Image (cartoon, rainbow, N blue to C red):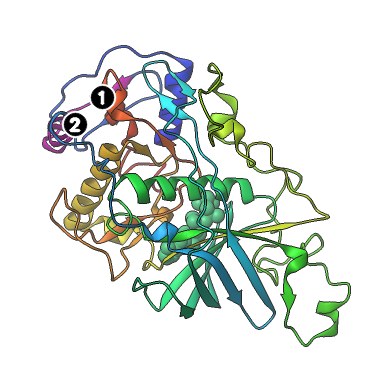
Amino acid sequence: MNSGRLRDNLLCNPIGGNGTKNSAQPTPYARDNSTTHVCVSPLTVTVMVSLMLTPLHLTILIVPSSFSLFSALTVTSDLFRLDLARSETFPANRFHTDKKAYWRDRQFVALPPPTEAARLELELGKELGAGGTGVVHTARVVNQNSNATIPSQVVVKFARLNHCRNLAREAWIYERMANLTELNGTVVPHCYGFFTAKLPECYWTSSDDDDVYGYDYLGNNDHSSHPKYPWMFRSYDENRDCDDTLDDDRLFAPLEDPEGEKRRFKDQSPWNKWIPDPNDPLIAVLVMDKGGPAYTLEDEQDRDVRWDIELLLQDFQLAGIGHGDFRMCNLVRAPPQTTMCSFHKVVHQWNVIDFNRSWVVDLKREKRRNYAAALIKPMYPGSYFHN
Ligand SMILES: Nc1ncnc2c1ncn2[C@@H]1O[C@H](COP(=O)(O)OP(=O)(O)OP(=O)(O)O)[C@@H](O)[C@H]1O
């Protein structure tokens, strides 16, 4: 069962107890549909001790994060030029394991996007992959005027036109990881920000007249598996009028009004009630480091690979981030510029991507921290992971 399903179970069936010790289990935790059994391995013990002794991987970083380096982005291709601005991300509600509900929390807010930061210019390359939310392309860095060194190749994840809200959520997870944890650049690719632009403001560079006059830019009638523009609907996009529901949309327990100034909570976010507007379509993208090939069953035969994945899952546990969709396709070889994980003192060989289904707990405020940490850890390897 993936961690999202496990959390759903918790919401439906309150579970008692912290689990049982079972040294015969090959993986740190074993779970079934009706109850939760938490099996303790040496790695689990490390997490538990860490939860008592360390600041939970949640350190306020003093250096400006990669997420705030740029306030403007230009993406060019043979067909178009897009000028995008940094946009506000979409905060999640806190998942409160004691209350068994999502909860509005004063620390779960979006940061104001930088307006006077540097500009990044990219030339779009080939498509790397596509999924439920978007399409990912390689891109060459043509120019950038920040003081930071960034790799010459990055990736751009385009939301399809109906999935900008989901991408804004993924962006918030990257923003949170970049500002409150050491995960970016060690177990997830560095993310260089979340940018949006209105499609009508796009500049068409194609010399083909059909592209300029009367072309179906939304892809409503394009049924090919690789539509011409990355934001276009794909044949498998069933619901084009709204984005997919997120977990904390349906399980939010309202709180009292927030105190003080207007804060950027989930329910006050402009993304909360966002629906795609076919007459004024929005383009939304994330820019991040390029990882290598995705995990395969062959990789799984390697004990060192399995160990590295166990360690990086531990990093997520300590940061309080449940992935929600932990599958083979969401594990990629770490980018070459990956830095050492300060907790394990190794450079992880793998990185986790795709966070639009993620959920966040604040472990230091959970009454049953070990239980919450166990809940965060997805089954690895397992049938859901092999999907
Ligand atoms: N940073 C990256 N480095 C290398 N490859 C990547 C990166 N990000 C995405 N990809 C590739 O693009 C594919 C699609 O990306 P991603 O999973 O983020 O899209 P999605 O639309 O959110 O998919 P899903 O249906 O799983 O939600 C990945 O499976 C992977 O092959």
Marks 2 and 1 sit apart, C-alpha to C-alpha, by 7 Å
Note whether 115 is above or below 6 in the view shown: below
Q: Any mark on residue 192, and which?
A: none
Pointer 1 residue Cβ closer than 8 Å to ligand 1: no
Residue occupying the point 62% across, 46% down:
165
Answer whether labels 2 and 1 touch (C-beta < 8 Å): yes
Q: Is residue 189 left or right of residue 249?
A: left
The image shows residue 272 at horizontal and vertical percentages of 63, 37
Report the residue marked by disc 1: 369
Name the foreground residue: 78 vs 197: 197
Magenta includes 130? Answer: no
Relative to 121, residue 348 above or below: above
**Residue 39's image quarter?**
top left
Residue topped by disc 2: 51
Residues drawn in magenta = 36-50
Q: Amino acid at mark 2?
A: Leu
Residue 23 percent across, percent down from the top left: 12, 29
Element under disc 1: helix
The one of 232 and 226 positioned closer to us in this rendering: 232
